[in-house]
Image (cartoon, rainbow, N blue to C red):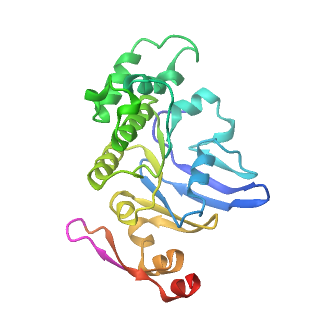
Amino acid sequence: MSHHSPEILVEDVTWSVGGTTILDGVTCRAPSRAFTGLIGPNGSGKTSLLSAAARLVRPDCGRVMIGDDPAATMPRREFARTVALVEQHSSTELELTVEQIVELGVIPHRGGWARPAAVGAAEVVTESLAMAGITDLRHRLWQSLSGGEKQKTQLARAFAQRPCVLLLDEPTNHLDVSASLELLDLIRRRGLTTVAAMHDLNLAAMYCDHLVVLREGRVVTEGPTESVLTEELLADVYGLDAIVTPHPRTGRPTVTLCGVTSNTERSIL
């Protein structure tokens, strides 16, 4: 595969667990070099769709294409050189330093999984730490880091894979506002094909070029953020009474929440 940032195409992906359908005929795309947000209520299938794209789960039918290549048949190391995943919950019992965690990202580029790091690995680690803005943390132990520092460490590990595609599961979960903005700025600056499951609608509006909206394992709609994020959609999919207006500075959509729709209130009562 050439090292550009390919489009991702999900074609009719269905996945069930124990008789429960989690993804139901999902077809959508993530355009090349764009930031695509997966949005939808809890339980709509966002993490499962990311897991299918990352080959953590094998769909019952359908396929995920990374550029011209079916993800399922790409050789393991080639896939790891192409796609990096930053999961929502990452923890380790081992006493690893930030530098050691970032070094894990270099593994797919070694001569063999168990061989010493190739020449240049140290430079890749140093560069990845700098990209994520955590050079000063390199000798800190994982357990001593804040939530934002842990997320940046995971991002640096992903950068060390030198991927074309970056997949993220709620990357700003547990982060404060400034840490969230800083992290999403970092991700956008890389200019990779990026897919992130997001629950904060205003962050999605600020950073995403393209949105895929899921509900109950199906795609409701997808397209440019400005055309997808409407008052009608928020009422229909989330049961929200909201006003969507252009941001006074950027012109991007801004969601002002007014409450839940009367239908939602009735269903809760």
Residue 206: quadrant of the picture: bottom left
- Rendering coords of residue 148 (x, y %): 34, 43
Residue 58: quadrant of the picture: top right
Give the quadrant of the N terminus: top right
- Residue 194 is left or right of residue 203, and the answer is right
Q: Is residue 245 a member of the stretch shown in magenta?
A: yes
User: Magenta segment, which residues?
Assistant: 243-250
Q: Is residue 15 a member of the stretch shown in magenta?
A: no
Seen at 48% across and 80% down, the residue is 235
Number of numbered labels in the structure image: 0
Q: Height in image: 115 above or below 135?
A: above
Residue toward you, 12 or 157: 157
- Rendering coords of residue 179 (x, y %): 29, 48
- Rendering coords of residue 209 (x, y %): 39, 59
Seen at 50% across and 79% down, the residue is 239
- Rendering coords of residue 96 (x, y %): 44, 24
Q: Height in image: 20 above or below 248?
A: above
- Residue 187 is left or right of residue 24, and the answer is left
Residue toward you, 225 or 104: 104
- Residue 158 is left or right of residue 52, and the answer is left
Q: In the orientation shown, which residue stands out farthest toward the left? A: 249
Give the quadrant of the C terminus: bottom right
Q: Height in image: 240 above or below 31?
A: below
Q: Height in image: 121 above or below 247?
A: above
Seen at 28% across and 73% down, the residue is 246
Q: In the orientation shown, which residue stands out farthest toward the right? A: 19
Seen at 31% across and 53% down, the residue is 176
